[in-house]
Structures are given as C-alpha cells and as structure tokens.
Amino acid sequence: MEELIIDAHILNVFTGDNARGNPAAVVKLTSWLPEHELQTISRNLGQPITSFIVYIEHSYEIRWFADYVEINLCGHGSLAAAAAIFEMDPDHDPDIQFVSRHGVISVKKCTYGYTMTMPSWQSEHNPELKKYSKLLGLEAIDVFSTRDLVLVLDSEEQVRDFEPDFDVIKSISEYHAVIITAQKGAGGYVLRYFAPSIGINEDIATGSAQCSLVPYWSNKLSVKELEVRQLSIQGGFFHVSQSQSDSIELTVNVLLTQVVNFIDELKNE
C-alpha cells in the first residue's frame, strides 16, 4: 500500500452580487494516477467537482470528476484550477492554458477577477424537442439542444418556481443536462441547470451552461455582453460575452476557502 500526500485547494467560483458561488476542489499532481484513484480522491473530498491538473510544457492537462463519474467539460472547475495555481504561485504568468480531452480552455487573471474563454455551441431547433416541455410539466416558449437540452421559459419567476422531478430529468438520457432559462431585463438572462445523470441534481453555478446560452441570448437580445444569474439556492453570478463566433468569455470572481491536506492510500494494482 502506497501513501500519497495530497494538498487540495477548495474554492468558490461565480461569487458576487449576493451569490455564494459553486465550490470546487483542485488537486495538482506530478503525473496522472489511474482513473479509479482520481475518482476515489474526488469522492473523499466531497465537493461537487474536483479538478485534477498536471503541468506539461507551458500549460496544464486537466480532468474533472464529480462524485461517481468523470465529466467532459467543467467551467467552474477550470476557473478554480486557475485560481489555485495563482495561490500556489502568485508570480505565475497571468495566462493559463488547460488542455483537456475536449479542447483547450484559456483562463486569464485580471485585476477584477478571472476571464475564461470557452467554446460557443450553436443550437439545434427540432420540433420533436417540444415533447420535453410537456414531459417536464413546463410551457416553454422555445426548446433547443446542444450538448444539453435547453427550455426557454416566459419569465424569471417561472424559472425560479420550477419544481424538478429528478427521475424524469434523469430519464432524458440523450443529453448531458437539462437547462431552463428566461430573459432578465434588456441585457441578461437567468438559468437553472440539472444533471442527475452525473450525480448533480441541480448545479449551483455552471460555466459550461453558458456555452449553450450565450450564443442564443446574444442573438435574441442583439447584445454582445450579458449579465447572468443562476437561480440555485446558493446562486451564481456571471458577466459573459460573445467574444468570437466560435467562443465566449466569462468574467467571474473566485474565492479560496481552505487548503486541505490529507494522505490517500493507493493500492498497488
């Protein structure tokens, strides 16, 4: 039995404007461990997401784990990883590149927080998607899909008051998650994000959801910059923009809450 001493940084991402943000753990490794060990460490840390990073030449490889599964893209986990790097090395270059199996994510440290560039996902509108509105007990005014299923509601109140049936949402297995959203004012929108299939019934604040929503609302409202509030209990707050036709930018706050030191026992297999 081998012992591995681990330092895990715990941070809250998407804080501000009375939003407490979404916690994530970050573990920096010198080399990759087997997947089952990463999963065990993530479960032991007990955070919604654990980001594992390994330094490679001029950038970092990154992987994200929820309690019981590895996920394919996590915005708040990426921002937490960047903030943890600056906590460990305050003189680090302000531009950080994360290389994942699903593309490159760029994060830049600014005087007012962190800016992250993520892909912009174009929506697919199919009349068949309207069946999901009825299935979820909603009266959606628009339904579209990306990696996720997105239902557009008529008001912020309808988004806030929605009572999800997680068994029904989990049965929608064709999509990574279900998002409900509505316009907020002339230049913003609200959302809630449900992903029970990966062990997250309702996410607190979701960076990757903006890959689906920024292109839609930017086009709908004819604006490039938007303010976003995620209506979870803890809440999340974002400044977002459609920076390029194929990318978006999120500008957010990240707060370090604690550094956890523990010994993980690794089985030699």
Image (spheres, grey):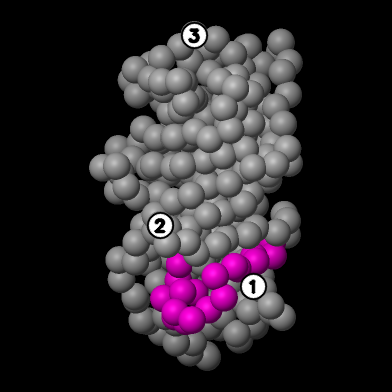
Residue drawn 63% across and 49% down? 118
The amino acid pointed to by label 3 is Glu
Label tally: 3
The amino acid pointed to by label 2 is Tyr
As drawn, the label of residue 123 is none
Residue drawn 69% across and 77% down? 58
Q: What percent of the width, then of the height, locates residue 172?
A: 60, 28
Q: What percent of the width, then of the height, locates residue 123?
A: 70, 27
Mark pair 3, 1: CA separation? 43 Å
Disc 3: which residue: 139
Residue drawn 46% across and 11% down? 154
State which region is magenta: 83-100
Disc 2: which residue: 112
Which of discs 2 and 3 lies nearer the camera? The answer is 2
Disc 1: which residue: 60
Which quadrant of the figure contains the C terminus? bottom right
Q: In the structure shown, which secondary structural element does the residue marked by tag 2 occupy? A: loop
Q: Nearer the viewer, residue 37 or 105?
A: 105
Q: What percent of the width, then of the height, locates residue 12?
A: 36, 57
Considering only order in the chain, which callout, 1 or 2, is on the residue closer to the N terminus?
1
Q: Nearer the viewer, residue 163 or 145?
A: 145
Could one spot residue 174 in this view of the protein? no
- As displayed, is residue 170 above or below residue 246? above
